[in-house]
Image: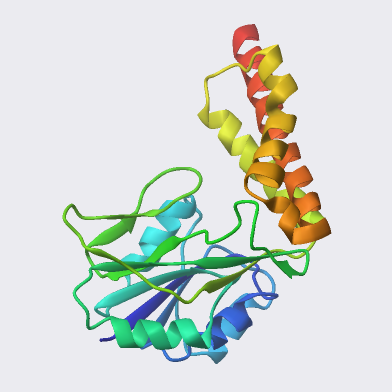
């Protein structure tokens, strides 16, 4: 079975070569870029990718644009900071002749140099491999995901996709600031004083204690603290947005 790999990019020269190297086995690689000014496009050209420039319309629409240009029977959608392991590549090639219409795979996340196993970081299953024409990304501002046609059969892959998600604390906080702004804009709810007060401790207890983040050592502690800060930041931005709406 032939496989198209679809990737969206914007200034991904630190990640894209690793990603492309991991899918050299694919029948075609589609890159949809929205204005990279670093070496991203030159690297993609080295790998013979089919390249398109498309003005940014949001994560879901950008990914659906990439998927729409696939010509193979199967589509594997990847982020530029992800890597298909050799084991996962072999499993994909040996599994596609089965009866499923899509497959989800576990994703291993790298946080400050450590592959996280607890605190909600694993197995982080992602549905990324599907028959062309049977799936698309749901058009939401954040946390886009593939939605399959009704009645589709979903299979499970065992080997993980690697995600080089947060190499530094700066990367974590930059993404947290961006994502929480979008989340606040999506919500019309004004958090209560109690909600603001309990946002941090409740999230910390969930990730560090209930989900076993402590098992990842100091990385688990730092991840739980930063994740709790992100939740608090979202609540504060929601409160700020509600106050601004009331003042209009």
When the figure is inspected, residue 14 is found, relative to residue 148, above or below; the finding is below
Between 209 and 61, the residue placed more toward the observer is 209
- Single out the residue that lies furthest toward the top: 247
Position in image of residue 188 (x %, y %): 52, 20
At a point 47% along the width and 77% down the height, the residue shown is: 159
Q: Is residue 73 left or right of residue 53?
A: left
At a point 18% along the width and 74% down the height, the residue shown is: 99
Position in image of residue 229 (x %, y %): 75, 38
Q: How is the rendered protein coloured?
A: rainbow
Position in image of residue 100 (x %, y %): 23, 70
Between 231 and 181, the residue placed more toward the observer is 231
Which quadrant of the figure contains the C terminus? top right
Q: Is residue 151 left or right of residue 164?
A: left
Which quadrant of the figure contains the N terminus? bottom left
Between 72 and 123, the residue placed more toward the observer is 123
Residue 6 picture quarter: bottom left
At a point 41% along the width and 77% down the height, the residue shown is: 5
Position in image of residue 193 (x %, y %): 71, 13
When the figure is inspected, residue 194 is found, relative to residue 174, above or below; the finding is above
């Amino acid at each position: 079975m032939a496989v198209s790999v679809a990737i969206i990019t914007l200034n991904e020269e630190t990640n894209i070569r690793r990603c492309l190297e991991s899918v050299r086995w694919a029948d075609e690689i589609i890159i949809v870029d929205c204005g990279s000014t670093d070496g991203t496009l030159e690297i993609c050209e080295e790998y013979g990718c089919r390249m398109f420039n498309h003005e940014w319309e949001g994560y879901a629409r950008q990914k659906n644009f990439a998927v729409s240009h696939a010509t193979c029977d199967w589509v594997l959608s990847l982020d530029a900071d992800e890597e298909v392991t050799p084991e996962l590549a072999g499993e994909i090639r040996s599994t596609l002749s089965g009866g499923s219409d899509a497959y989800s795979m576990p994703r291993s996340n790298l946080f400050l140099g450590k592959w996280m196993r607890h605190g909600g970081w694993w197995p982080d299953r992602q549905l990324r491999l599907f028959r062309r024409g049977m799936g698309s990304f749901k058009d939401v501002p954040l946390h886009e995901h593939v939605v399959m046609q009704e009645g589709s059969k979903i299979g499970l892959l065992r080997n993980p996709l690697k995600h080089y998600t947060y190499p530094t604390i700066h990367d974590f906080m930059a993404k947290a600031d961006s994502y929480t702004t979008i989340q606040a804009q999506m919500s019309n709810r004004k958090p209560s004083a109690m909600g603001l007060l309990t946002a941090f401790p409740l999230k910390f207890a969930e990730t560090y204690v209930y989900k076993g983040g402590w098992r990842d050592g100091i990385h688990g502690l730092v991840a739980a603290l930063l994740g709790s800060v992100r939740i608090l930041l979202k609540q504060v931005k929601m409160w700020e947005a509600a106050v601004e709406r009331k003042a209009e």
